[in-house]
Structures are given as C-alpha cells and as structure tokens.
Image (cartoon, rainbow, N blue to C red):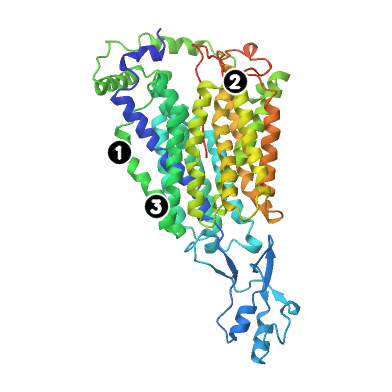
Amino acid sequence: MKDYDDSVAFLGQWGRFQQVVFFLLCASIFPNGFGVFSIVFLADTPSHHCLVPDINLTQDWLNAIIPIEVVNGKQQLSRCSRVRLDVVRNLSAQGFIPGRDVNITDLEQEGCVDGWSYSRDIYQSTIVSEFDLVCRDQWKQPFTSTIYFMGVLVGSFFSGQLSDRFGRKPVFFATMAIQTMFTFVEIFSPSWMVFVILLFMNGLGQISNYVSAFVLGNEILTGNVRVLFSSLGVCLGYAIGYMMLPLFAYFLRDWKSLLLAISLPGLLYIPLWWFIPESPRWLLSQGRVEEAETTVRMAAKMNKVEAPPVIFEDYSMHVGATKTHPKEQHNVFSLLRTQNIRNMTLILCLVWFTLSTGYHGLSLNSSQLHANPYISCFLSAAVEVPAYTSSWLALRYVSRRLSVICILLIGGVSLYFLQLVPESLSELSVALEMLGKFGMTTGSSLMFAYTAELYPTVLRNTATGTCSAVARVGTSIAPFLLQLSGYFKYLPYIVFGTLAVVSAFATLLLPESFGRPLPQTIQQMHKRESIKCPFITRREHSKPTVLFESRL
C-alpha cells in the first residue's frame, strides 16, 4: 500500500486547490488574532477617582475633596478614597478654605461610597468602568483574563478529541460559530459574573477553532507547502489579525461596540463551508475511502490534472488490519517512566511555561507601553511578523538547542535592562520590551518543533500536549504577575527575565535534534551531547517538524 503523500502526488503541491485551502485557512485565523488580545482594550482600566455627588460645594473644596497620593514617584488623585463628604459639606458651608484654614491631610477619609468617575480621554467605556472593577474589586480585572485563558486550557484538552471523533471540518465550523456567538452575546452581559462565564466559553471556541484549522491544513497540504503553512502561514494569519485589533479599538472606543466589531467577521466565513473540504486523511482513518477519493478527485479537477482510476488502493484493507493489531498505549505517565525522559520533560515544561508566561504577560501589558495604547498594541503585534519569520529560518538552518538558548537570553536580558533606562528615554524602554517580546514569540514557535523532534512517535503527541497544558498554566497566571508592578514598577519584567535566563541554562541539558531522523521508539531517543556549530548540514531525510502552534 502506498503512502498517502505518494497516493496524491499527482495533484502537485501548489495547484489551485492547494492555494484555495492555504489562503482560506490562513484567513480563518484572523479572528483568533484580534479576539485573543481584545481583552487588552476591553478590560483596560481608565483613570478614575471617587465620584463626588452634585452638592453645594465651593470650587476650592471640589478640587480638594480627592486627596493626592504618590504612585511610582508621581503625584496623582487618589483612586479609592475621598475626604468624608459630610465633613467637607460643613466646612464649605462655614466658609473655610482648604489649605489655608484647614489642613486637608488631617481630615477623615472614606471610600468611594457613591461610585467612581472615569476618564473618557482614551475609552468611552470598558468592562472595568461598566462593572466597577476597581479598588476592592480590582482583583477581578486580571482575573478576567485568567478566566479566558482557563477556557483556552480546557479547550486544548477537548479540541483534538472532538476533531478526531467527528471530523476536522465539522469541528472547525462549529467552533467558529461558538467563537462568534459567545463574543456577540458578551455584549448583553448584565454583570461581571455573566461576562466571565461567556468569556470562558469564548476561550473554548477560540482554541478549538485554531487547532481544527491547523490540523485540517496540515492534513490536506503536502510537502514544502505543508511546512510553510505550519510554520509561517497560520502564524502570519494570527499576527495580521492581531495587528487589526488596535485599528478596530481606535475607532470603536466603547467595549460593546468593539465586541460587536470582532464578532461580525465570523459571519463572513460561512461560505467557506463550500470551499474547504474534509480532510481525506481523516476520512481514510475512518474507513470512508469513497468519500476520500471523491474529495481528491474534486481537487484534481480544480488543478486540471487527471486522477488515476483507483487512488487509495487497498487502503480499507489496511485500516481493518490495523484495528486487529492494536499498539501499546502510552499516556502522560510514560513521560515519567525513565530518568532520561523524566528530566527532559521537566526541562521542556519549564521552557514552555517561561515562554508562554512571558509572551502573554508582555502582550497583555502592551497598553502600558506608550501613552497611546493603540500604538503600543500595534507595535506588540507587528513585532511578531519578524519573530515568526526568524523562527522559520532557524528551523531550516540553525541548531535547535543553540537557537532556543540564544533567543531566551536575548529576551531575558533585554527585560532586565529595562530598569536601567531613565524615564526620559521612553523610546528605548519600548524597544527593549519589544525585543523581549520578539524573543518570547520566536522561542514559543521554535519549541513546538524542538519538542516534537525530541520524543519518539509513540510519545510525541502526548509530550506536546503535556507541555502545551503546562504553558497554559503560565498563560493563566500572567495577568496576576503584571500586578506585581504595584509593588515595584519593573518587578514583572524581572520575573519574566529571570525565568528566561534560568530556562536558557536548563536548555543546555537537552539533546540536539537538528539534522537527525525522528525517533520512532523510546530506545531511539537522542542522548545528551556537547553543543556543536549551529550551522550544520542537514541530512536530506530530515525535515523540520512542526506540530500544533498556538498563541492563544
């Protein structure tokens, strides 16, 4: 029986059929790009202070009722307290002038019992101003992002199983519908609790949609086109969608309008049902040989080539034979079976955790980079284009271990240097943070291939899924790590940088995989060896392996 790639070789690699599938699937990633980090604008915290009711106060007392506090060396109006209103009313009525007749610091203060007044200089409204996620409820603001990424974590466990059971195409479109529907329904949330429940469901749909599109493209496309799609196509589709987000947010400054804008494009993908076919590989795995042949013959017609009379000869017999000889089953505990595998898994989990925490932490912090959050977000998105391009080049020409070590050191050291930059050189601070983001993005892309090449076939998917799950944990805690800036402005960067440097040294203990055939059994797993010249000759039979990659 011929291999699948050999069976469909008559189609060619870049005919009209492959072009349609390639570009439509890449375009389907756009909503994931502008949907994932929409929380940057939806949950940003506008400047605010306690609301002062419309009562009879002199202008001097209106200006003095909100006390001044020092934050990060700068004076600003207190966000969570005011001078007691009844005291101010009495003093104002008696004609006392604050600062001259009365020392403001001696007066008793109270919380914002009448609510808050929010600045509208940047946003008309966000969920923070809508649901008052400030002061005592300030913890809900980062927890909102965490809930979303917990949805992504849960979705990552089920998306592959659903796709394997029901097919790539139905799950792809069903999850796109879930993503669109829950994004739209979030507009009508009457409370923060309802909003985060819907946001959790949105996270489930986002990751499942991304995985389905990724797997569908990998199984339909072949050869170099498949490698290009896996390592660059979907990544650039995601980056383009991410760069579109600040454009939407700039013109739509109300959180409900922004949600409406990022939900409606999902309707544009409905016609794709008639252009994107089911994966022939999946159909063959289910024994549906006739349907697989029908799909391939349609592709041959689009490419204007003639298909052979029988495309998948004896494939149904092979499927039946495979079912009668089940293979040994492996699970996550197999990653802890021997010391070699156990140590390698722990190091890889650390690196994945570091890169995911740093990537999402820096992305969520993009609104704080610059006085203009829209410019900051665009820069954070734009830096991903050279990052993905660099990772693609590194996968083709450079040693895996040295690539990961160098990129971790670049990202970590640049974040360390941020605290040394004077405030007058804000552009340099932005450049260093973007260099850190470049390192985290490039490293995340590299680790999918590196991890896949280190493990044997029987453990490859289990290992990649386990590392990805650990990475999601880092993603979920990243919003809270950003809150450390309340204690020291640069503390989050120090944490991200420390994790990166520690991970770089830990990577020294991993074996090299570049230029080597993929291991098929546990016995063939690569042993540790000394670092060699990174620009080594790649063997002809060894190609970059790229599995599921997600920024979600």
| x and y, in percent, of residue 325 in the image | 52, 10
- Earlier-in-chain disc, 3 versus 2: 3
Q: Which residue is mark 2?
A: 534
Query: Residue at (49%, 27%) from the top-left corner?
Result: 392
Q: Please tell me whether mark 2 or mark 1 is closer to you in this view.
A: 2
SS assignment at label 2: loop
| x and y, in percent, of residue 61 in the image | 63, 83
Q: Which residue is mark 3?
A: 261
Cα distance in 3D space between marks 3 and 1: 19 Å
SS assignment at label 3: helix
Q: Nearer the viewer, residue 426 or 524?
A: 426
| Marks 3 and 1 in Cβ contact (< 8 Å) | no
Q: Please tell me whether mark 3 or mark 2 is closer to you in this view.
A: 2
Residue 548 shows in the view: no
Image side of residue 325 versus residue 507, left or right: left
Query: Residue at (50%, 61%) from the top-left corner?
Result: 190
Q: Is residue 39 above or below residue 47?
A: above
Q: Please tell me whether mark 3 or mark 1 is closer to you in this view.
A: 3
Query: Residue at (57%, 40%) from the top-left corner?
Result: 435
Instruction: Quadrant for residue 295, please give it.
Output: top left
| x and y, in percent, of residue 286 in the image | 42, 20
Cα distance in 3D space between marks 2 and 1: 46 Å
- Earlier-in-chain disc, 2 versus 1: 1
Q: Which mark is residue 271?
A: 1
Q: Amino acid at mark 1?
A: Pro
Q: Nearer the viewer, residue 178 or 54?
A: 54
Query: Residue at (23%, 20%) from the top-left corner?
Result: 304
Cα distance in 3D space between marks 3 and 2: 46 Å
Answer few, some or many: residues within 10 Å of disc 3's Cα (few below 14, many 20 plus, some between 14 and 19): some
Q: Amino acid at mark 3?
A: Ala
Q: Amino acid at mark 2?
A: Pro
